[in-house]
Image (cartoon, helix red, strand yellow):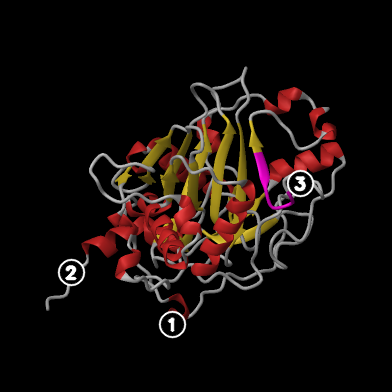
Amino acid sequence: MPVATVSETVTTPSVQDLKSSLGRLNLRPEADLRQFEHIDNSPSIGTEFRSYSKKGKPVLTIREVLADEGKLAALGRLVSERGVVFFRDSEITPEEQKVLVQKLGEAGGKPADSTLHIHPLTLAGSELGDEISVISNKFVFDDKFKRLDDAHYNRVGGKRLWHSDITFENKPSDYASLVIRDLPAVGGDTLWASAYEAYDRLSPAYKKFLEGLTATHIGSHFLELAKRSGAEVREPRGSPDNVGQHLSTVHPVIRTNPVTGWNGLFVNQGFTKRINELTQTESDEVLKFLWDHIASNHEFQVRFRWEENSLAIWDNRSTFHAATHDVDEVTRTGTRSVSIGERPYFDPKSISRKEYFTRPTEKA
């Protein structure tokens, strides 16, 4: 598929608008969620809350978060710092998932005209509403899609599945949530990887090289499905900027998260097709290296085994994720809601996660 021409420049907000390093949430000390029973799944990514404590610490439920604006803001900050946050025993409805990610985005200062994403192939008037995507190992959009050749949906290697959600949009996702509603007894796990750590583990020279580059992202898979089925791509999709039938845009290769002020790698094998400032051969080689870098470094990955009523919330600006396609005979189905954020940008005055945590502390 030819690369679409996108007449768009990648702009950088002012430093005052970014409110970098400490982010824009300005949390009260009592809103620190680490006072509640939790575990960090790895040093660089993932934090998990359960509804019970073996140590007598207070516990945190998602319903408490939904009812408290301070906790919502704190959760948004934590998700942006840790990449992905898990709640066990959440008992959250699809409608509450929508409320949750929209409020997280609002607390993080997303544009007023950014709401919830509508999947390009979601049919209007679907049972759960336009802003809920059904995620399943069985293709369940509509009967006309089911008539497509099943070979198109055959299992592919997990390495090829790593992606960030909807990066083909001009304004892609900030926060997303997923609950697996139909669970296999074993299998069907999801992995997340930290874009912060993927950036931090590159050499200074390679970081500098990437910081001056942009990449074209295309929703090729969805365009193919639309063409083969005769479906029309939905628009607008959660923002007046997310329109058009081409599902393509240009983003910086290194992206600054506006909540933390940290830089992360922002390419993915699902949607990134070309680094624009390089020749095709050069682009292919660089992208192959970066995709391998994301998929092969388990040091900045976390693997989550789903349980009944488990909830995952992640920041698409600073993570990648992939499902494990290891269940065939049973159905794995979930509900996902995706919030729309800002246009991606790179702030040359921003820092990395590693730089933030290793900076000299001020003495009193």
- Mark 3 or mark 2, earlier in chain: 3
- The answer to whether the residues at label 1 and label 2 have Cβ atoms under 8 Å apart is no
Residue pointed to by mark 2 = 360
**Amino acid under disc 1:** Gln
Q: Give the number of marks.
A: 3
Q: Is residue 68 left or right of residue 132?
A: left
Left of 101 or right of it: where is 261? left
Residue at the spot 43% in from the left edge and 45% down from the top edge? 86
Mark 1 or mark 3, whichever is nearer to me: 3
**Separation of disc 3 and disc 2 at Cα?**
49 Å
Q: Amino acid at mark 3?
A: Thr
Left or right, residue 299 beside residue 326: left
Q: Upstream in the sequence, badge 1 or badge 2?
A: 1
Per the picture, the main secondary structure of the magenta-coloured stretch is loop
| Mark 3 lies on residue | 122
The part of the chain drawn in magenta is 129-134
Residue for badge 1: 16
Residue 276 visible within the image: no
Q: Is residue 72 above or below residue 310?
A: below
Q: Percent position (x, y) of residue 179?
A: 55, 41
Above or below — where is 106 with respect to 152? below
Relative depth, front residue between 220 and 31: 31
Q: Element under label 1? A: helix
Looking at the rendered image, the disc whose residue lies closer to the viewer, 3 or 2, is: 3
Q: Residue at x 69, y 65 (%)?
A: 239
Residue type at mark 2: give it. Pro
